[in-house]
Amino acid sequence: MSSKGIYAALSGAIAQGQRLDNISNNLANTNTPGFKKDQTVFREYLSNYEKLPTTLNVPRVPASVESFYDMQGADRGYAEAIGSFSDYSQGTLLTTGNNLDIAIEGEGFLEVLTPQGVRFSRSGNLRVDSQGVLVNQSGFPVLKTGAQDPAQRVFNVRDSNVTISFNGDIYDRDENLGKLSIINFEEKDVLRKEGNSLFSLRPNTPATPIAAREYKIHQGYIESSNVNIVQEMTDMIAANRLFESSQKAIKAFDQMDEKLNNEVPKTRA
């Protein structure tokens, strides 16, 4: 009986450990521009609660200790972390004074061309590389609207002295170089993080990017991460306490097993 309890307690400890990993990653990216925090999703299996209210399990065997202590499947309860989801809420806009820094106010993502294909980002730390191409902090070209071929949608600029309008048009002196490609998705669940503040589509996802509408580009600003340090620290303390409680439960069940195996047989003898 106690071995089943150990499993339930162990599953809770593992789930809280995964939650702590997630919180640690959020805290580590507090100062990462455009970072979106993740939250862990849990699932709890309680077999006795999943039965219909009208179900009545009547023992069909002679009275016994096992039938008297029938737990209706509650001894098979456990919890697990089934994944995490990203919170895409708006981060604070911070002024930088850098002419090539941009922040997106509202929904939408920048399209960025990487060696693995087009990716999406909220990070607006831009610069001009040695080839005169407008790139992000990782050196990947930022794309504009237009041709189907992403390689034909890069920005070629003379220097960093450009003007960027609220709707994303980039002007190099009096020349309009094009409009930043700001795209959105009806369901954000189709996105997954790849690192370097980039998102990609999940495999076998039929979602199609659409042009974002409700947004405004702010030149000379960046969007900070949406991580709330106070909330994350509070969650970390709570997760640590739950993890410690699960450890104590595991130890208690282990002690019960030890007594059942070593002391109870002696008393009967």
Image: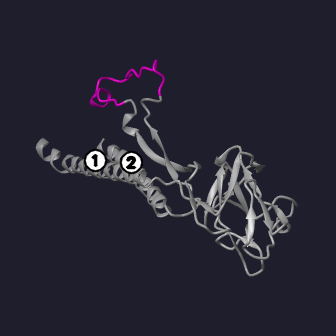
Q: CA distance from mark 2 to mark 1?
A: 10 Å
Magenta span dominant secondary structure: loop
Q: Secondary structure at mark 1?
A: helix
Is 103 a magenta residue? no
Query: Which element type, helix, strand or loop, lies under badge 2?
Result: helix
Q: Is 119 in front, or is 223?
A: 223
Q: Residue furthest top?
A: 54
Residue at the extreme bottom of the image, as rendered: 130
Name which quarter of the figure residue 192 lies in. Answer: bottom right
The label on residue 12 is 2
130 left or right of 174 in image: left
Image x and y of residue 41, in percent: 50, 46
Q: Mark 2: which amino acid?
A: Gly
Q: Can I make out residue 118 in this image?
A: no
Residue 249: mark: 1
As for residue 66 lying within the magenta part, the answer is yes
Tag 2 near tag 1, CB within 8 Å: yes
Query: Magenta segment range?
Result: 51-71
Q: Name the residue: 41% across, 22% down.
A: 57
Q: Earlier in the sequence, mark 2 or mark 1?
A: 2
Q: Quadrant of residue 17?
A: bottom left
User: With 221 as the anchor, is 145 left or right in this view?
Assistant: right
